[in-house]
């Protein structure tokens, strides 16, 4: 079994005693999507990120570092345009 560091979504679900279908319904997503997230074959969709950060106690940066990088890049671009 993967540990919490590797798979916080699955860890949360197991601790909550929920089946994949049950948690998927609670979060408003499909069984297939949640299963792929747990198996590491799909990134967490942005629309689920806030629900998952709240449930797992992990930050968005921990769960989706690519989004943080993209946000930082956008901030740099906007700061450069504002300086012009």
Image (cartoon, rainbow, N blue to C red):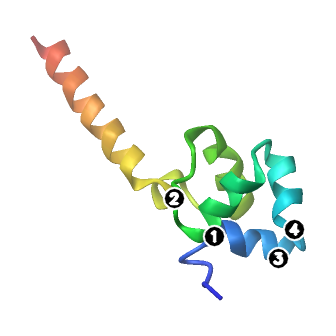
Residue found at the very far left of the displayed protein: 84
For the C terminus, the image quarter is top left
Q: At which x and y percent is residue 61?
A: 46, 54
Q: Secondary structure at mark 1?
A: helix
Indicate the quadrant where residue 32 lies: bottom right
Residue found at the very far front of the displayed protein: 32
Towards the viewer: 6 or 21: 21
Task: Using residue 40 as the reference point, say whether residue 9 is left or right of it.
Answer: right
Dot 3 crowding, Cα within 10 Å, few <14, some 14–19, many 20+: few
Which residue is disc 1 drawn over? 8
Q: Secondary structure at mark 4?
A: loop
Residue contact between numbered discs 2 and 1, judged by CB atoms under 8 Å: yes
Mark closest to the chain's N terminus, 2 or 4 = 4
Of tags 2 and 4, the one toward the viewer is 4
Which residue is disc 3 drawn over? 15
> Cα distance, mark 1 to mark 3?
10 Å
Q: Tag on residue 67? A: none
> Cα distance, mark 2 to mark 1?
9 Å
Residue contact between numbered discs 1 and 3, judged by CB atoms under 8 Å: no
Task: Using residue 64 as the reference point, say whether residue 11 is left or right of it.
Answer: right
Q: In the image, what residue occupies the spot 24% across and 21% down?
A: 78
Q: In the image, what residue occupies the spot 14% across and 22% down?
A: 80
Which residue is disc 4 drawn over? 19
> Cα distance, mark 2 to mark 4?
21 Å
Q: At which x and y percent is residue 42?
A: 53, 56
Q: Secondary structure at mark 2?
A: helix
Which residue is disc 2 drawn over? 63
Q: In the image, what residue occupies the spot 79% across and 69% down?
A: 13
């Amino acid at each position: 079994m993967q540990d919490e560091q590797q798979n916080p979504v699955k860890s949360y679900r197991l601790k909550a005693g929920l089946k994949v279908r049950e948690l998927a319904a609670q979060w408003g997503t499909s069984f297939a999507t949640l299963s792929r997230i747990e198996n590491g074959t799909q990134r967490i969709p942005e629309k689920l990120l806030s629900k998952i950060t709240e449930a797992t106690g992990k930050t968005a940066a921990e769960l989706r570092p690519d989004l943080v990088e993209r946000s930082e890049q956008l901030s740099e671009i906007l700061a450069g345009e504002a300086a012009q």
